[in-house]
Image (tube, rainbow, N blue to C red):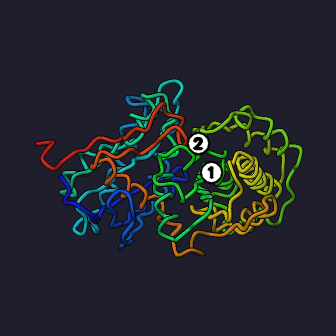
Amino acid sequence: MLKPGAVWALGAMSGTSLDGVDAALVKTDGDRIEAFGRHAYRPYSSAERATIRAALGRWPGGDGVEAAAEVVETAHAAVMSGLAGEAEIAGFHGQTLAHDPAGRGTHQAGDGSVLAEVLGLPVVWDFRSADVRMGGQGAPLAPFFHFACARWIGACEPVAFLNLGGVGNLTWLDPREPAPDVPGACLAFDTGPANAPVDDLMQARRGVSRDEGGALAAEGEADEGIVAHFLSHPYFFRMPPKSLDRNEFHGLLDAVSGLPDADAAATLTAAAAAAVARGAEHFPAPVARLLVTGGGRHNPTLMRMIAGLLDCPVEPVEAVGLDGDMLEAQAFAHLAVRVARGLPTSCPGTTGVAAAVGGGQISRPGHLR
């Protein structure tokens, strides 16, 4: 389907923060990154965000799911259409509404066959289901792209990538290994809640989508008792790989309900940082640096808290020439090429799947006709 060698691929991501859709071009052969291309962003409106939020935790056929999927497809089509003419293939993650790998599986709203028609491109989508069917967590899926990024920046010793979206996740990797699915090359897992609880707090108490720049948290004082209780959650005692649903720690918001706004924001931010530090205890070897991507890297208060708990440099990915706003969209461009070429997209070290597996189904234009 694809010509040999590196091709331009278009990826898109709508994360658990529910802020909008990122789309980005990457030139890759599915193994190595050759170049990064143009990118775009399309925010969700307040009404669109509310429609998606109303469907969180629901499975196919549930109330509001069809409406959420329509919002997701419309927003993705809008932002991806402006870049599709430069790509040979696209990767569409969709919007995660529910994630229960040990039970009902995983549910991302949005139909890739609809986007294939709109974009006029083969679209790879439903990346997580195959991994879950084989006993994996279905998440996180960016680690194989992180491995390629580590090679692209010339790393020659272990490094870690931290994505601070609605949920946090860590990838520890050793770029000296020949491939990301080789035992010992990658370890990845969700750390715990990151931006989601603070975002939800700000929406509920102040009617805004986030604690801009961590300003409110910087004014408050974290309740260490609440943070300590948070760290007693069974999730933190499970060995990785492991993954979370966005709302698995919903009790955290209840715990800060009696605190003033600033102290509540500080407590939720401190909890996110503590979860990262607890996750770093699982690294197979020390890392030369922790590279941070996702919206949380724009929060100086959160970044300062994380740096204070770790004994390695903590830097945004821009420090090594990467784009932290687009890294996840770029990841699904890279993964789309891997799927099209029959390469694995996850392995035991990244999701706990029984063996390396390639996820995703491919929809081509004309499929709906």
- 158 on left or right of 48: right
Callout 1, which amino acid? Gly
- Residue sitting at 89 percent across and 44 percent down? 225
- Residue sitting at 36 percent across and 58 percent down? 333
* Residue 219, quarter of the rendered image: bottom right
C-alpha gap between disc 2 and disc 1 = 10 Å
Please report contact status of discs 2 and 1: CB closer than 8 Å, yes or no.
no
- 318 on left or right of 340: right
> Between residues 133 and 42, which one lies in front from this camera angle?
133
The circle drawn on residue 246 is 2
- Residue sitting at 22 percent across and 68 percent down? 85
Question: Label 2 neighbourhood size at 10 Å, few (<14), some (14-19), many (20+)?
Answer: many
Up/down of 139 relative to 298, above or below: above
* Residue 127, quarter of the rendered image: top left
Please say whether residue 110 is visible from this viewpoint.
Answer: yes
Q: Tell me residue 240's x, y (percent).
A: 63, 38
